[in-house]
Structure formats: C-alpha cells, structure tokens
Image (cartoon, rainbow, N blue to C red):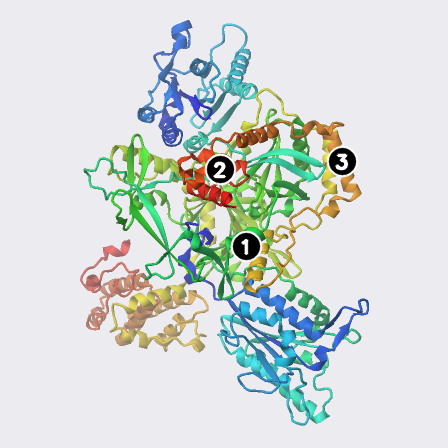
Amino acid sequence: MELDPDDVFRDEDEDPENDFFQEKEASKEFVVYLIDASPKMFSSTSHSEEEDKQESHFHIAVSCIAQSLKSHIINRSNDEIAICFFNTREKKNLQDLNGVYAFNVPERECIDRPTARLIKEFDLIEESFDKDIGSQTGIVSDSRENSLYSALWVAQALLRKGSSKTADKRMFLFTNEDDPFGNMRISVKEDMTRTTLQRAKDARDLGISIELLPLSQPDKQFNITLFYKDLIGLNSDELIEFMPSVGQKLEDMKDQLKKRVLAKRIAKRITFVICDGLSIELNGYALLRPAIPGSITWLDSTTNLPVKVERSYICTDTGAIMQGPIQRIQPYKNQNVMFTVEELSQVKRISTGHLRLLGFKPLNCLKDYHNLKPSTFLYPSDKEVIGSTRAFIALHRSMIQLQRFAVAFYGGTTPPRLVALVAQEEIESDGGQVEPPGMNMIYLPYANDIRDVEELHSKPGVAAPRPSDDQLKKASALMRRLELKDFSVCQFANPALQRHYAILQAIALDENELRETRDETLPDEEGMNRPAVVKAIEQFKQSIYGDDPDEESDSGAKDKSRKRKAGNADDVKYDYIELAKTGKLKDLTVVELKTYLTANSLPVGGKKEVLINRILTHIGK
Amino acid sequence: MARNREGLVLLIDVGPAMHSVLPDVEKACSLLLQKKLIYNKYDEVGIVVFGTEETGNELAREIGGYEHVTVLRNIRVVDEVVAEHVKQLPRGTVAGDFLDAVIVGMDMLIKMYSGGQKGKKRMCLITNAACPTKDPFEGTKDDQVSTIATKMAAEGIKMESIVMRSNLIGDAHEKVIEENDHLLNLFSSNAIAKTVNVESPLSLLGSLKTRRVAPVTLFRGDLEINPTMKIKVWVYKKVAEERLPTLQLYSDKAPPTDKFAKHEVKIDYDYKVTAESTQVIAPEERVKGFRYGPQVIPISPDEIETLKFKTDKGMKLLGFTEASNILRHYYMKDVNIVVPDPNKEKSVLAVSAIAREMKETNKVAIVRCVWRNGQGNVVVGVLTPNVSEREDTPDSFYFNVLPFAEDVREFPFPSFNKLPASWKPDEQQQAVADNLVKMLDLAPSAKEEVLLPDLTPNPVLQRFYEYLELKSKFTDAALPPMDETFKRIMEQDPELSSNNKSIMDAFRGSFEVKENPKLKKASKRLLRDKPSGSDDEDNRMITYDANENKIDIVGDTNPIQDFEAMISRRDNHDWATKAITQMKNRIVKLVENCTDEGDKALECVLALRKGCVLEQEPKQFNEFLNHLFELCQERKLPHFLKHFTSKKITLIPKSEAPDSDVVDENAGDYFTVKQEPMLES
C-alpha cells in the first residue's frame, strides 16, 4: 500500500519516453446504437418450443446493448457511445427531427464515454419506455415523414465528433422491419428509398461504418435483399454469409469477455547489432503481460474524493525533511560503505541499450527453466533504418529452417540480460492471426538466478526409484485418456479478474446480485468421471500404489506439524485480551504475536503493527 | 554451527598449469566471500591450496605424506581479511594432487564439526585436474576414491568440483585426464558431488555459486489427478532473480559531533485530499477506488473480502496436451520445480512414470495451482518433464505459468509475405543469412556449448561487489571499468567472428542498410532553422514538386531544374544520390569544356550546394568542391576560381549541416589551402 499504483501496474519494460512513438492507429471508437422502436418491435416473438418464454425484439435489442455496454465500459472505457431510438412518439435530438429520441442521462453529453448511470438507467428503459418515449411508426407516407432517414441523420451528426483519422466510427442498427417503405405508394417509396440510401452512403463516405443487426420473426426470415443490403453496402459475396452470421454477432455483443483492450503501442525501440557495421531497427511489443484490474485510486472514505499521496524522507536524528537524491549505504566489513544515486546507476549501466547478436544455438539448448519474465515480441521497422526488414526476414527464415535460436545481449533492461530470440512463424486460423510473424525475445536467467534444487533431493549412492514398464504403460494410458481436446494457451479467463469486474459492476450499478462468474480453470468434472477415464486413473493408481492405498496417507510430517501448531495454541502464555486492553501487545515479540494468530487461524504476514492491529480486530469481534 | 550455517573449505589448485587462470579464480572466490560477509556472515570458511612448494597441513604433520598441500586458513568465521586473502593466492611450483587436497579438506571439516553439529558442510575444488594422482598404499585409486566419497556422504559433506579445461598445455597426458575425470565421476556417484567443466574465465565465474540461499518450499501438498488419485509433491523456485542488496538510505543531517546519530531515514506517506490542503487523512480512512468508465468506484475492504474470488490450496491436473501446443514464449514468469515428496516413495514413482512418459511422447500437463490457502488468484501452468540423468536424483517437473485470456494483447502485424518485394531478401541474400545462422555457432556440440545461462554470471552484480570492496578501502574510489571477462557476453567472441570473417563480410555486403533520409530531414530541419534565418534563399530556390517527379536524369539543357526535381523525388532515397552524382558530372563537363559558360557551371555548383545542404550530404559537396578546385588548378582555369571567390561559394560548414567536418571559420579555406587534411577523416 506504500507503493504508487502507477508504478506497480506499469508494464515492467514499458518505456514512458516512447509514448511519442505510439502508432497512429485508431485508438478510440465512436458508436451510435440505433434501435427501431416501432410497434412491430414490441410484438412478442413466440418460441415454438417454449411457449411461456416470450421476448419482444425490442427486449432482445435493448438487453443486447445493455450487456454490451457493461463489457464496453471495462474493455474500452475511452470509447464514446450514444443510444438513439427511432420510430418514437416523443422526439429528443439536436436537429429536432420527429420520431428520433436520443437517450441520455445527466452529466453526460449525448455522445460520450459510457457511465454507470447511463448503464443503470438504460437497464430500466423498458419500464419507462412507454411513458417517456413511446413507440410510434415514424414513416408516414402522407407527411413524407421518414424516421429512418432522420435517425441516420442524427447518428451521423453525433459522429461528427472526433477525427476520423484517430477514431473508428460505427452505427449499430437494430430492426426487424426488412422493408421499411413497403406500404408506400410506389413513387413515394422510390423517393424515400433513394433519399435514405443517399443519407447512408454519405455517412459511409465520411468513414462511418453501418452495421445492421436484423431481427427475424420466427416464421419469416429478415429479407436483407429488400432494402438493407444497399443501405449497408453489401456486395453479393458478402450477402450469402450475412444472415447466418447475424446470430453470432448478437451473441458476441452480449457475451464479451471483460478484458481491458489496450492500444497497440511500441514498448521499446531496439537497435539490433548483427555484426560490427550492421545494425537494424526493431520494435518491441509487450504482447503478453499479466492483466491487472486497472489502476487503484485511493479515495477518502468519507467524501470519496481522490487522495493525493505525498512521500517525504525524514532524517530520524534531526527530524529534518531530506531533499534531493539521498545517499545509500551498504554495511560491509564493519563500516558503512556509501554510494551516491549516480554511482549506483553507473554500476548498473554497463552497456548501451542495444541488442547485440552473439551467435546461434539449436532450439533444444533452450531449456524449460530458462525463463524469468514475459517475453517481448520483436518486429522489424524500416522507419529509420531502411533495409532492416529485409535483414530481419532473412534471419527469421534461416532460423526457422535450421531450427535455431539466436543468443543476444540486451542492454535495455536492468540488469542487462542474455536473451534468446526465437523466430515465430505466422499462424493463422479462421482468417485471424493467431501468432504474428517475428521473433520472441526470451529473457534468460544468469547462473546467479538458477537454483540447484534437484541436488537437494538426491540421496548419494541410493538409486531413486524408477518406474517399471508396466507402470510406464499405465501412465501412458492415463495420459491418452486425459488428453485435452483443442487445448490452446489462454483459453481460460482469469477467474479472480472476472470476479473483480463483476464486483465492480455490481457496486457501480447498485445491482442486488453479483453476476455469477464461472471458474473455467477447474478440471472438467464430467470428463474426469467418464468410466474410461476413471478406469485409466484407477489402473495407474493400482500399478503405483498396489493394493495398499493407505501407504501414502498423511501419517508423516504433516500431522506432526499440525500437532505442534495445536500445542502452541493450548500453551497460552499470555492473556492476549488483557494485554490488548492495556495496550501492551506491543511489548510481545513478533513470534509471540504470531502464536496467537496461528492459533486463531489468522494470517501471519506483515509488520508488527499490522499483526497487532489484526489481533485487536479479532479480539474486538 | 547452527542449522542454517555453512562450513566451507575451498580447495584451490595453484600449480604451474593453473597460473594463467588464477586471477579469475581469485575473483570468483573473493566474490563468494564478499557475499558471505553480507548475507551469511556467520558462515565459516577454510582455504587450502595445493601444488605449492612447501607443505603445511595437519595430516602431513600427524601421519606424513600429503605433500605440497598448504592450509592457508583454518576453518573459521568469515572476516574482513579473508576476502582480501583469497585475492593473493600463492603461485605454486609443483603439479598438485587433488585427491590429497580433498582428503585434507575432508579431515578439516570432520575435525571441526564432529559430534553431530548441524549445518552444511561443503568443499569446493577448483583445479584443471590434469596432473597425475599418486597411487594409494593399498588397493586401487577407485577403491580409495569410493572410500573417501562414502565417508563424505556419511559425514554429510558435499563437494563441487570446478574443472578448468581451457588452457590445457600440450604435455598434459590424455590418459591422466581421462583417469582424473573418471575419479571425479566416482565422487559424484558415491557422494553429493558434482563436477562442472568450464572452458572460459566467464564460465568459471559463473560456475561457482557465490550466493547461498536456503531452499524454501513454495508449496507442499497434493498434485491431484482426480479426487481419488493424489501425488505428494513439493514445489520450489527453480529460477529467481538475484538482485543487488537493498541499500539503506543514509542521512548526513546529524552534526558530526553526534556520536549516537543513527543516520537513518524514515519514509513518511501523507494522504491529502488536495495537494494544497494541510489536512491529512489517516491510512485507514482511505478506501480503494477502481475506474468504471469516467468514474472511480470505491470498494471497501469488507466488500472485497466477502465478495472476492476464493481459492483452496492445491494443484489440480486439467489434462495433457502436445508439447508443440505450448509455444515457448508463453512462459510468463520465473520457473518453479515440482519435486515428489522425498519421504513418499510411491509419489516419486508416480512422478517418474508420468515424467518419463511425457518425455517419450512429447506431451505436457496443464495444471491449475493455488499455492496457499486464501491466495487471491489461481495460476494455470504447464508441467514439463525433468528426467534426471543421475541415478540417485528423482525425476521431477518444471512448472511454468501460462497466460490467461485477458493477458494476451491481440495486435495484428503484417504478414511477411505481404510486404513489398524490396523489403524481402532474395535468394542470394537468404543463402548468406542461412550461412550466418549456421556458422555463428555457439553450440557446435552439447559439450562445447558456450554462454550457457547456468554458467554465465550477472555482470552487474559482479561489478557492484567489486566496487563495494574498492569503496570499503577508498571512500572516493572511482568506478573501475567493466571487467574484460564480461566482454564475452556483451560482444561477439572475436575468435568466432574472425573464423567466420568471410561470412560476416558477405552478410554486411548483402544487406545494406541506411538511415531513412525523410526522417533525417524532419529532425535536421529543426536544427538548421535555428542558427540561420537568413537562409530563406535556400528554401525558396528548391521547391519540391510532388507531381513532377518523373525526371530521372540531369540533362544538358536545364540541369538545375532537373537536379532539383530529381533530388526531391521521394519514392526512393537513391534518387538523391543519383542526382548529386549526375550533377557533379555535369559540372565537371561544363568546366572541362571550358567555354565561356562559366556562369552556368557556377549556378550548377550553387544548386548542388543547396541540394546537399537540404539532403544533409555535406561531405559529398565538400569533397567535390575540393576536387573541382584541384581540377581548375591542373587545367589552368583560373577564371573559374575567381568566379568562385567572387560568388563566395564555400564548403558546407557545421552550422549548415551538423554532419560536416568543416568548422565555420574554415569554410572558405579551400582557396588558400591546397590539401584539406580534414577531408581524409
């Protein structure tokens, strides 16, 4: 808690100075949700199987958006969104057009970052909709009213915000009316179709993409060809795939993993010295870093205002506040050896920040224990040094072909490290990139960092037990039975993080119930209980443990230690409650404090003050 | 000796064959002792050297023999002098017998720690093991070594042998070496002894474990295959970064007369609502807030406690998968090792059976782990087999943490195939690269592998402790330069590069790289705008016309325009170079033709100068101007020279192009000085 949260949660190897080089990619999204609110959207769609479960299309659309917003606010909270209903009785929009109602809550512009209040009120929209907004068909032949046209206009006007160079702009259109001008006289229909399509085209020309989420009646599929294929600009190839993909799209919107999305940025710019006189330019990206629940802001618990932390260094002898860099000491040989901050940083600065190639080794020289921290992904750049990409690709290909990795010295970390550069071929699946092409820089430990644990468990001259052929065979059968189908790294969501987001959402939105998060990391119980699996495990167990399954029961050390702990608890030397009352707990030693904590199964970590506080809280209860 | 302490005897070969590496041995040993002074200051150390002229050990005095083995220091608690001592090892004169030294060392340890003293006993033998050992009085050498080793094992003495084999002198007998290696192996199989062969001073420094860390288990419990089948395992850290010691803050505020000053610094944290406010909030009045959209939502500790994700300690198997499914770069953290509980023979068997089968079939296991009860999160990781080569070591697993779905950032990168052809290597270049990757080989065979992580020491730590030692003697000592030994990890091995010189040259030749001129300009323009301001002419004269970039030759009729158009072509950096070359040729022709078109040549020179300033190619122009000057003198064309002087055409000085070698005052010097010495640089 004494740490600056920004420091704790920054990527370890991120270099703040490099913010300047952040790539100019769309880093922000502007989204307008357009929801058809015509009476047709409210007619319930009956599911033939489940008669009692009736949902209107309006409900489907609204709950889909509500779900999507709840992910959005965590994943991309800088994006700006707006929600507009069309075919409404009331109107509310800047252009004052009939039949369009832009939904909003106080303290928020019409298109703005989503807020808790917006989500909260939008969750309840169905209750108040009829009273406040109302449904009314807005396409009227006689008055030439065209609410779809107006809706597109309002959305486009909202999306005027933000530069199209730095932001993606999108409209999501929810409707179940595949032929909005179907009932018109032919001339009016043509006219309205033409103007509406033109409006849509104008929007698209401005770089706004329009995405349609059509809702089909159970008995009649939404016919995209009637009108909307032109509105969203589908060509005939895309047309065939469009309708089947709709269901998935809706599911995806609803069921997004809560995961903060970060803009693509270069974590490091690296000069790679291949040999004397030849250096190329690489960019380093942090593609894998432990996700954290966002930065912590400390608040004053009474006012909920953010708290500023001020750190001061105080001389214990004089009480004076220390300014500027403070000297450090290392006790050594009965004296205090003094270092200035500058001297220490010089000790650490042993090289330029370059990456220097030292040579190549076969891939099997890279052992499983040669790892310290997450890798950095390297991709070449010709931005400053022309020819970098070519040299990089040539080495990349050779390394893959010859199954070798490069060993290099990298001066850009503290301390500088030997690194392994492992070439990674591009892997694609379903049209998406699973692994980008490039090299992964793996930070290697030094001899100082590697511990010889194996030696500790060796008994000299005594052969360690080795399995028989039968035991190996049973192990093999077990492994075949327990094969994970289609396993991919990162298929599991982090259960603690998902729970954190669920808590955050519940508190922010005053929800009564905590959304259940599933722990995907638990073993697949059903699969484990399949008879064949159970049998394989049973046979392996039998082959190892024989008929005496109790042989390995907890008879040994564990019980003893338990007894010891219990003994301690009985053997109460002090009346802790009395000591606590008189404030004399601080006179006890840490070990004595821990005795109490252990006896009461409380955590024993922390400084003495923390321990005392913990005991006081416990006694207080 | 307490449980946690170590008694160590260093057995150092100082015979003539070792002299060349002794400085490195001294360095390694002194680092070991220095760290003991800081981290394990109650450890006890003795030093024995062998190969010395004289003899000085208790065994020799008691029973005779054991010649040329000298005890430099009896076993006692490390102190200030010992680190010093070990830096001045004597240089011996005879080939030492390492077996004698081992017996002397063992005798010291046994005498010192007899009577069931707890604690660790260790010998560290540093030798080249290239000198013959004496035959024992009875039995064979093998018998003798086995007896010693068994005794060592019984006494709980560990031994590590570092065998330095880079500097073998020609007359070292292969048979002797073979025999010695065999004897050292015998130690390994009968006692806790290991032998590390090192080939360079660098790996010598890395091979000696200088920091003793008491191994602590991270987890002891069940590896659960399913609720009915559990294997008892212990988990340790296999890899953990050794950092610099945490230095304390020092305050010099106390008056020098204050003898009781502690010189300590306390760090205070104040929590305030606003920076200006003086009102300080107590730490427990704060509450954690998390961003939710634009707002910060406070979550009280109670809420966190009751709602948070709860875990139960344990390791659960999720299943097995192909090793190729787990790409190496997904390993997220330092590595753990999962060892079967040494007291449970059946667990040792079970781990061994699975590990061996995994290795056989190239499979790995995916497990879900919670190391402690109430730990805030679970870890999903991969177990890979660690099948032991030593018979007496149980098999185990390495454990690496894998990322969760949220930990992956899916940034797309262009496919290499889709890049423009000019960015991709051609066949010849590919062949050159293949050659480099093949020949710049750090592991010609498993035995000859260099730069093994396991034998490569951390240069920063080495440097810090060296500096610490130095500062302890001279407070104001300057930081010594980086130790030469560490060049081997910071730069390519000169021997390896010179052996592969032709390949390196071919690589350099095939892959030309150059700085991007566009970017250069953007940054340089800023520089240029500062000093001048009167250079408006320059900017006016050359106007880049994007549409007119079809010109690819500097013609006769409008050389200046052609040149300007060409140099401003941005589709390829080559155009600028081409334009400059062609312009030079054109000027030389104009001068050589020696018509009265002196003015035209002059204008061309001016245009070239401006172009070179803009492209930041001062050298190109300066060299050319000198060349032109010489040409005019040779051809006796003084009127050109006069023109140049009158128009004040000068070399491009530093103020106009930072890359220039010419200082401003000398810009006009080419008229007066015949040879420009600075141009040779």
**Chain for numbered disc 1:** B
> Is the residue B445 above or below the residue B628 in the image?
above
The crowd level at tag 2 (other Cα within 10 Å; few <14, some 14-19, many 20+) is many
Task: Return the residue at label 2.
Answer: B453
**Chain for numbered disc 2:** B
Residue A533 drawn at (x, y percent): 76, 41
Of the residues tagged 3 and 1, which is closer to the observer?
A: 1
Residue B360 drawn at (x, y percent): 68, 36
The crowd level at tag 3 (other Cα within 10 Å; few <14, some 14-19, many 20+) is some
Of helix, strand and loop, which one carries label 2?
Answer: helix
* B619 sits left or right of A234 in the view: left
Of helix, strand and loop, which one carries label 3?
Answer: helix
> Is the residue B649 above or below the residue B437 in the image?
below
Task: Return the residue at label 3.
Answer: A538
Of helix, strand and loop, which one carries label 1?
Answer: helix
* A480 sits left or right of A403 in the view: right
Name the kind of residue labelled 1 in the image: Glu
Q: Are marks 2 and 3 on the same chain?
A: no
The crowd level at tag 1 (other Cα within 10 Å; few <14, some 14-19, many 20+) is few
* A32 sits left or right of A278 in the view: right
Q: CA distance from mark 3 to mark 1?
A: 43 Å
Name the kind of residue labelled 2 in the image: Pro
**Chain for numbered disc 3:** A
Task: Return the residue at label 1.
Answer: B303
Say if residue A288 shows up in the picture.
no
In primary-sequence order, the first of circles 1 and 2 is 1
Q: Are marks 3 and 1 on the same chain?
A: no
Count the marks: how many?
3
> Is the residue A143 above or below the residue A101 in the image?
below
